[in-house]
Image (spheres, rainbow, N blue to C red):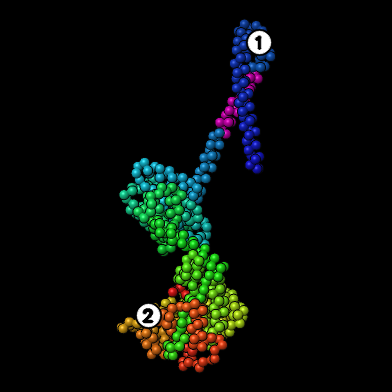
Amino acid sequence: MHKTDKRADTRTKASRDIIAIGIAVAAIVMFVGTGGTVLPQILRSWSTGSAGPDAVLVNALLLNIALIIFGLRRYRELIAEIEERCKAESRAQMLAETDPLTGCLNRRSVTPETDTLIKTAAKSDRAVAFLMIDLDNFKQVNDLNGHKVGDRLLKETADTLRKTMPADGKIARLGGDEFACIMTFAKNAPDTIDQIASALITAVGKPMTIDGYPVEITISVGIATNMHQPSEDAVLLDGEAMMHRADIAMYHAKKQGKDRYFWFDPSMEKELRFRNELESGIKRGILEGEYEPYYEQQIDLATNEIVGFEMLARWNSPELGLVNPAVFIPVAEELGVIAALSEQLIEQSLKDAKDWHPSLTLSVNISPIQLRDPWFSQKLLKLLVKHNFPPQRLEIEITESCLHENIGVVKSMITSLKTQGIKISLDDFGTGYSSLSQLRSLPFDRLKIDRSFVGELKEEDASEKIVNAIISLGDGLDMPVTAEGIEDQRVVDVLKDKGAIKGQGYLYGRPETAAKVRERLAAQGLLANAPARATPAGASNGTAGRTHQLGLRKRA
């Protein structure tokens, strides 16, 4: 039935009720008038045996009685309907203001309740705290044990919150696995809220068994109060503003490792706004082509000649200026746009590298996210064909962390790329958890020693054992070595004595644009139209290859 039909039916029923009551009232009035004449005559007839009242008056009296009975019945029905409507309205209001699963307040009602509590607290010179609570990894509990167990867990959590909260506290389920607690506290004792937040984390975090399934859950808590902080102007906060602030603090707690609580601080909101601007800018930057490759020199330590470059991604943002990859690469990975960003940079680098001497190779540093794409190798080969770039001049770099996500997929992809003639390097070696069996089974062509180990060599009493071990491992597996992060001549002198090694670092200059690199190569006769140079010593172990490295590197 449509709403208009329901309203029309209600109006018709109301009209009938008014008419029925009007008839009953008129019948009572007529009964008084008619009864005053007819009833005395009836009594006199019974007592003396004389003629009774006029039949018409008797019939009128009986009709009045019938109408009165009808009116009384309708009146009782109306009273019953009114009571039923009141109950229905109460149920509707309860459903509108409470969560049916847990019996807590819901998102719609928590804001007005908070506003009411703020007014009440103000009369006794108290403050109000709003605690936003989110269950960590609740989706995993649902996926592993089913939604029935998930619902039971929500009920248990609500009961735990009720038992732990102070008597004047209010609890709300805002939706999904999000809860809120509001309470008052003495303005000079905010540590009371710290104690309650800690108690909530401890109580909810206790192991429990639900329908035979062992369940452990933790919570992240964000706290906001209507008291202004010294670092901000005095503002009157209502329930909506407090909920917003507590939400920001709660996500900050999640970001800091979960299973903890944080008070809202204005800097959190500024950070969140910056993050939103950064995300929007990153997506726009891909569409507008704002990302640019910068190149860092690589040097053959034996000959001190340039043997290539490593590309460090830079973002020329119109609003933020030149942004370091350590800032935008992790965000791009979280947003799922790293593949598009990487492909854009790879394509630009292929164009740049075509102008260089044919002996130079191009190395591409790949994000772990890209290796999850089963079509990655095909996409890469398509770019090579498009730009007529020989695959033998291309080198792929992957980090050790990639090896633990899906070793089967990684091995298949590496094998596919090597079949096409592409070289594979293991980047940042020594910082991850790659095993010797993985190094033996995966067809890597080169090891890159992480800068953290190389940087230690500049100290007078530095231990060279780790670097020596990696170089020896590379020799044993027939993998040449590149040392990253060379910033001191002493490091070069130490590494020169350890064999044919390539090196890179700020000792040889800061990263440069493609135009600057072209100028440098032109001065040394290393552009595409330059005559071929003699093969440097040490070519047999792979150090002679000129390497330009395109990297989505998370460093300056």
Q: CA distance from mark 2 to mark 1?
A: 126 Å
Look at 56% across and 36% down and name the residue there.
Answer: 85
Horizontal and vertical percent position of residue 450: 42, 79
Q: Give the mark count.
A: 2
Relative side of 254 to 384, left or right: left
Q: Say if mark 2 contacts mark 1, CB within 8 Å.
A: no
From the image, which quarter does the N terminus lie in?
A: top right
Residue 68 among magenta residues:
yes
Relative side of 532 to 11, left or right: left
Q: First in sequence, mark 2 or 1: give its number.
A: 1
Q: Nearer the viewer, residue 215 or 129?
A: 129
Q: Main secondary structure of the magenta part?
A: helix
Q: Using the rendered image of the protein, determine whether residue 191 is visible from the camera's viewpoint.
A: yes
Q: Which residues are magenta?
A: 62-81
Residue 53: give its label.
1
Residue 455: give its label.
2
Q: Nearer the viewer, residue 213 or 217?
A: 217
Q: Amino acid at mark 2?
A: Gly
Horizontal and vertical percent position of residue 396: 52, 80
